[in-house]
Image: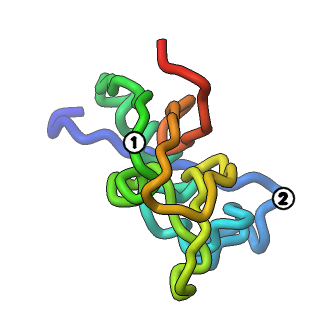
Amino acid sequence: EANDIVVLYPQTGKDAINQCWDWWGYTDPGAEHNYPTRGGLQMAAIKAMIDRVAGIKHPRYCGTDSNLAHVAAGRAYTWPAWWFWPLYYASGSNDYLGSLGFSTTTLQETRPGYFAPAFSCP
């Protein structure tokens, strides 16, 4: 307390494999490459915990953009990334957005790092 230090001890649940952090992607089905990034479920949860302890509030995203722009902003990802014609998915929800990068999609962030298609924004 004298040094203004806060220690956060997040814990995995009893269903976690070996009671460990997700170091290979088992908590993010369909988005195995997201686990070490801000889009990964555990990393998004840790960031949200830190923000909550620090009193930081972030406005949630809601907007329409091309699938390529969503990927560039981290709101979506492509799979498989090495294909000539990648498929686009929303980060967090893994909802399919289509196979064209120039197609526009409206995405809404319903919780930190979790984006889902929406018909319109409030």
Image x and y of residue 53, in percent: 37, 29
Q: How is the image coloured?
A: rainbow
Who's the residue at 48% across and 37% down the image?
112
Which residue is drawn at the image coordinates 43% and 57% (left, top)? 102
Image quadrant for the N terminus? top left
- Is residue 85 or residue 94 the one in the foreground? 85
Left of 70 or right of it: where is 34? right
Query: Relative to residue 56, is residue 38 depicted above or below?
Result: below
Q: Which residue is mark 1?
A: 65
Does 9 sit left or right of 80 as displayed?
A: left
Secondary element at tag 1: strand
| Left-right relation of 90 to 59 | right
For residue 47, which quarter of the picture? top left
Q: Position of residue 97 (x, y in %)?
A: 62, 52
Residue 16 lies, in percent from the top left, at 77, 63
Per the rendering, the mark at residue 10 is none
Badge number at residue 15: 2
